[in-house]
Image (cartoon, coloured by chain):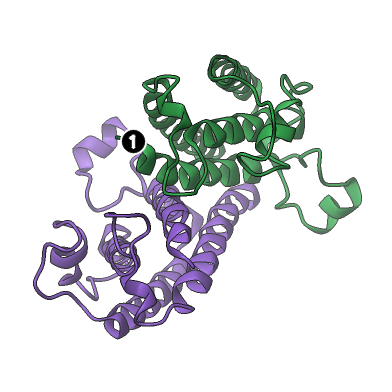
Chain colours: A green, B purple
Amino acid sequence: MENEGSYIALGLKVWKTQIDRADKLFVSLSSEDVLREIAYGRNRLLYLWGHLTATHDAMLPLLGLRERLHPEFDVAFVSNPDKSQAAIPSHEQVRQAWKNVNAELWKGFEKMSWSDWLQRHSAVSEEDFAKDASRNRFAILLSRTNHLSYHLGQAVLGLK
Amino acid sequence: MENEGSYIALGLKVWKTQIDRADKLFVSLSSEDVLREIAYGRNRLLYLWGHLTATHDAMLPLLGLRERLHPEFDVAFVSNPDKSQAAIPSHEQVRQAWKNVNAELWKGFEKMSWSDWLQRHSAVSEEDFAKDASRNRFAILLSRTNHLSYHLGQAVLGLK
């Protein structure tokens, strides 16, 4: 049990490290900066930031913590490419949602016991989970941390 | 012990997933392709590939598995920026090294027991490890997986 706690603590530490890097990067941007593309013709920083926010928001129900805070972000930042929607959430709305979603996630993480992390996540059925117990909440934490790193590698290219 | 094995299995699964993505991306490139920059004025694909290879190579001693296979990669791909060296390893040398280093790592991972993963990695002293047991080999696995994801996010931008 002591060891089990240490694997989860490590997973959370790596998550926190990447969130801190993202905070530092995104929060420093002006409303003009966020409209910059990461490379010619590619996604804008605001799109990446909104995409990460929506992905993290979706983790709330996936981990059984609560309903989503911003399901409306998906149309703008997940199911459609950048620059395809007439109206998307503003810089200020994304900034606030990013902050709230990650705070809510962290609050949930702190309440989870080590055995909670090995439970199935909500997108896998009980039947499928019985066949493959690796489809658990800890797997979501690890994969979403990597998803964050992936887009962070892109976002740094958009900095001046 | 059963649960402990499942955290490690998850960590290894996420590593393997990212390695497979990288394999698919890099191995498809021609010798002309690898010289393409990921964005105007940024690193070339060959540099990212060599950088990931060197980083993974350094994991071998860090995890106590064996000495490095390609310490000479550091000058070209770690300690100096892209396009600063007169001569760097060729496309074929990087391709071969990437394959060998990752195969050697996987061979090592398969021999490690769950308790090995919680041992200190070789860059931390026994004294420092006594103060902070999170500086272990599992932490290296998680952080290097995120490092790989970070640069994969960049490498995809260099694809046609």
**Could you tell whether B60 is left or right of B15 in the image?**
left
Density class for disc 1 (Cα within 10 Å; few <14, some 14-19, many ≥20) is some
Q: Residue B64 or B103: which is nearer the viewer?
A: B103
Residue at 59 percent of width and 30 percent of height = A50
Residue at 24 percent of width and 53 percent of height = B122
Q: Tell me which chain the residue with mark 1 is part of.
A: A
Residue with the most extreme left position = B86
Residue B158 versus residue A76 in the image, above or below: below
Q: Tag 1, which secondary structure?
A: loop
Residue with the most extreme front position = A86
**Could you tell whether B71 is left or right of A88 in the image?**
left
Q: Position of residue A83 (x, y in %)?
A: 61, 39
Q: Residue A157 or A60: which is nearer the viewer?
A: A157
Residue B94 figure quarter: bottom left
Residue A90 figure quarter: top right
| Residue identified by numbered label 1 | A159
Q: How many marks?
A: 1
Q: Position of residue B138 (x, y in %)?
A: 43, 49
Residue at 22 percent of width and 36 percent of height = B128
- Which amino acid does the dot numbered 1 rest on? Leu
Residue at 81 percent of width and 38 percent of height = A122
